[in-house]
Image: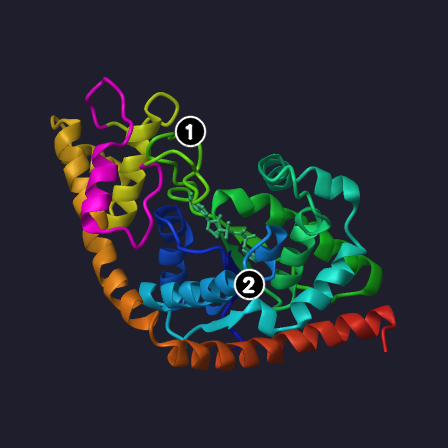
Amino acid sequence: MEDKKIILSGIQATGDLHLGHYIGVLKRFVEMQEKYNCYYMVANLHALTVRRDPEELRENAYKLLASYIAAGLDPEKSTIFLQSQVHEHAELGWVLDCYTYMGELNRMTQFKDKSAKHADNINAGLFTYPALMAGDILLYQTDLVPTGEDQKQHVELTRDLAERFNKLYGDTFKIPEPFIEKVGARIMGLQDPTSKMSKSSTIPNDTIMLIDTPDEIMKKVKKAVTDSEGIVKFDVANKPGVSNLMTIYSIIKGISIEDVEKEFDGKGYGDFKTAVGEAIVKELEPFQTKYNELINNKEYLESIYTEGSRKAAEKASKTLRDVYDKLGLI
Ligand code: TYM
């Protein structure tokens, strides 16, 4: 197990997942568990940067766990755990806060975006969030961090912090690499294909949720914004809507973008959208069946996170002990 490369990633426990999560990371998490030693986390401490109802936050953790398993993560192969159950995350997060400069955090585009969105609650957690994320990653001596495009800056900061710490105190952390796919790392909204697909989009039909019904999915895809050219061709700058649908189709079908172009050569957007919608519905069908089963089986989900969190803590505590020793914390 230990000679395999180590992967750590997580998703915030903020409710139901959307197709961007699925294509950008979840589908990849499942592929990676065959080859790597994977730690997949329910990032519920991170979710506190926005005010949340406690019952909802609890429920969201179960929803995310159920989504992980429904998508195909196997607790026998991957360590699946809750961030709040491994106290080392909060502890290393604090330590790293003290080694992160305000200037570095000020440059984080996600902080800028989120503080614009939540202007009435720009709390210190929102600002120092990347240091907590760095702690998540560094605790596991992680080699690779699979994420979507929007998290790249945070992983780069993580590398800087690890290097800074190692330079001061000697080898402590493995320097992790971002692991971002060329295709699919930024799925865009269906109505506004110049902004990434996100749960917080207020535009109707912009976001496909993983638990949408087949009818809802077909309707949203059919309404997706395209252009007046009528040609299925990949050109992000001039045809962002069509290119986004092509990306989704290519990942779900496991074919290249060129093959998508060939398949729809001479066909119009009507046929194309029907095929994309049907591919999504078919892909999500087994996910939805499994999810609906799991979400009512809290006992099973509890057994998964209890065992996963125990395994995660075993690894995390070693790194934190080393950090505390080096810093002179008794
Ligand atoms: P979060 O919860 O916003 O998103 C989870 C992952 O999904 C990716 N993603 C997308 N990928 C493609 N297209 C989209 N439209 C799309 N929307 C979201 C994100 O890039 C991300 O990889 N800070 C992280 C969670 C986190 C984490 C970590 C990740 C906490 N600790 C340690 C990696 C390692 C976040 O908020 O992701």
- Residue at x 21% of width, y 39% of height: 219
Which mark is first along the chain, 2 or 1? 2
Question: As displayed, is residue 100 above or below residue 298?
Answer: above
Assess whether residue 147 is covered by the magenta stretch: no
The percent position of residue 215, horizontal first and vertical second, equals 18, 46
Q: Which residues are magenta?
A: 205-232
Amino acid type at circle 1 is: Thr
Q: Is mark 2 within 8 Å of ligand 1?
A: no
Task: Tell me, yes or no, if residue 139 can be seen here.
Answer: yes
- Residue at x 52% of width, y 43% of height: 150
* Most foreground residue, 19 or 62: 62
* Most foreground residue, 146 or 51: 51
Q: Which image quarter: residue 299?
A: bottom left
Tag 1 residue: 194
- Residue at x 47% of width, y 47% of height: 148
- Give the CA distance from mark 1 to mark 2: 34 Å
Assess whether residue 226 is covered by the magenta stretch: yes
The percent position of residue 194, horizontal first and vertical second, equals 42, 29
Tag 2 residue: 54
Question: As displayed, is residue 166 above or below residue 262?
Answer: below
Q: Is mark 1 within 8 Å of ligand 1?
A: no
The reply, left or right, for residue 211 in relation to residue 330 is left
